[in-house]
Amino acid sequence: MTEIVFTPIGTVRSQFRDPKDMPIQPVGARGIRGTIELDPTYAAGLKDLAGFSRIIVLYHFHRSSGYSLEVVPFLDKTPHGIFATRAPRRPNAIGLSILRLASVDGATLHILDVDILDGTPVLDIKPYVPAFDAYPDERAGWLTTTSGAAGTVRSDDRFCI
């Protein structure tokens, strides 16, 4: 396959300096504030984003190296294929969080429900559109029985460098 190279468009600023003991999903980070400091070169791309209450943030798991095709995720004690989890040690260390957008101030996005490590490079931002992005009645595989714990489970060092 051909190598693909991305250039970050900004950086997440959050209270989390260490990957250990962080929320594992935005549902476990309710009310936690942070910012995305966008490179000013891309500020014009934020036009009209303030009209959305949530954004989808794609980012690089910059503190993760290597990958495992089977992992024991935070919400289970059984190994699962990496593509059936949201674990950070992936062939392409790309993360995704759907966050609340509080405001846009120039090239800075003020965000809530932040479950992302401070200093994380942002690859892309997209508006969350409930009519396009919400499918609450779909199957959730093995997570059907464990996803309710995502609000209280915290990370440990199993995926740290």
Image: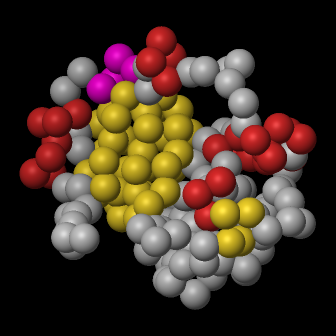
Horizontal side of residue 77 vs 8, given as left or right? right
Q: Is residue 12 above or below residue 113?
A: below
What residue appears at the point 79 percent right and 68 percent down from the top-left corner? Answer: 79
- Where is residue 131? Give x, y as percent: 48, 12
Q: Along the line of sight, which residue is nearer the eye, 70 or 147?
A: 70
- Determine the image quadrant of residue 116: bottom right
Horizontal side of residue 92 vs 142, given as left or right? left
Q: Is residue 92 above or below residue 101?
A: below
- Magenta stretch encompasses residue 52: yes
Horizontal side of residue 146 vs 36, given as left or right? right
Q: Is residue 124 visible?
A: yes
What residue appears at the point 74 percent right and 46 percent down from the top-left corner? Answer: 28
- Determine the image quadrant of residue 18: bottom right
Give the extent of the magenta segment. Answer: 49-53
- Where is residue 24? Give x, y as percent: 70, 56
Q: Is residue 127 above or below residue 20?
A: above
Q: Quadrant of the C terminus?
A: bottom right
Q: Quadrant of the N terminus?
A: bottom left
Q: Is residue 28 above or below residue 90?
A: above
- Where is residue 36? Give x, y as percent: 38, 50
What residue appears at the point 40 percent right and 50 percent down from the top-left corner? Answer: 58
- Magenta stretch encompasses residue 7: no
The residue furthest front is 1
